[in-house]
Image (tube, rainbow, N blue to C red):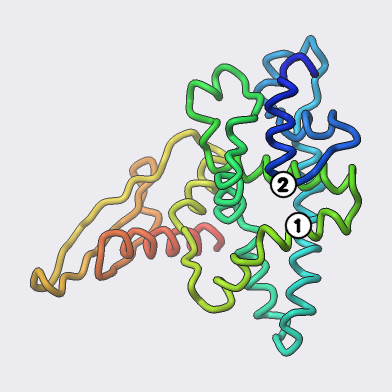
Amino acid sequence: MKEYFSKEKLKELENKLNINFEDQNLLRRALTHKSFANENSDLNIKDNERLEFLGDSVLSLSISTYIFKKFDDYKEGKLAKIRSVIVSAPVLAEKAGELNLGKYLLLGKGEELSGGRNRDSILADTMEAILGAMYLDKGFDFAFDFIINNFRSFIFEVDNGNYIQDYKTMLQEVIQKNSNNRPDYEVVKEKGPDHNKEFYVAVNFEEKELGFGKGKSKKEAEQKAAQHALKQLDN
């Protein structure tokens, strides 16, 4: 796999992550999407899905440990809500975007052409794979410190009620597990004077209405429609 990654790029990413991997094959694997491995099956290259699985657990345990100690008067339900947001795809994708992880990914040609380098689901999965690789290379304490240093601000935004969950992205992630198509948002009604309008939005997928929401702006109404759709899909 070495020939597919330049030493300069790997070193650049290590500097961003503030880590020197003892086993750089772990980092290479964390950056290898299944589309590349599938297109080059004759090379017997391993993708990052197993590391993603491991990283998900490392992230969850780290966040759980931190908030358990930090908020010692919070009940289980409140702790669970904070954790669920922090380990969600939108937060992981946002952090991956800050680190520009898409720049370092190894993608198949089809995934590259379809914009996979900037796709939130791929970025979130890559972030988890990086955490898995970090854990294997440096141990839990190192991974824990990295996670808390990088996700602490999200934790306090969620706790203070200042982090707005991106339900539209979350809905798209759910849908794209089984389809390459995207949901459509349609303003079905506007009500009230210009200075105090209320927007009514429906979210549709493949000609079926998934959810409905209303808000003081189109953006708010779309988020509420996506939130409603997610609840409907969970039922």
Label 2 with label 1: CB-CB less than 8 Å: yes
* Crowding at mark 1 (Cα within 10 Å: few <14, some 14-19, many 20+): many
Type of amino acid at the residue the image marks with label 1: Leu
Outermost top residue: 42
Residue sitting at 54 percent across and 48 percent down? 174
**In front: 37, or 30?**
30
> Residue under circle 2?
128
| Residue at point 76%, 55% (across, down) | 146
Mark 1, residue position: 59
Residue placed at 35% from the left, 49% from the top?
204
Local secondary structure at mark 1: helix
Mark drawn on residue 46: none
Residue 202's image quarter?
A: bottom left
Q: Relative to 38, is 147 above or below?
A: below
Between the C-alphas of marks 2 and 1, the distance is 8 Å
Residue 35 in the image: x percent, y percent?
A: 65, 24
Please name the amino acid that badge 2 sits on.
Answer: Glu
If you read the primary sequence from the N terminus, does the residue marked by circle 2 or circle 1 appear first?
A: 1
Is residue 162 found left or right of 141 in the rendered image? left
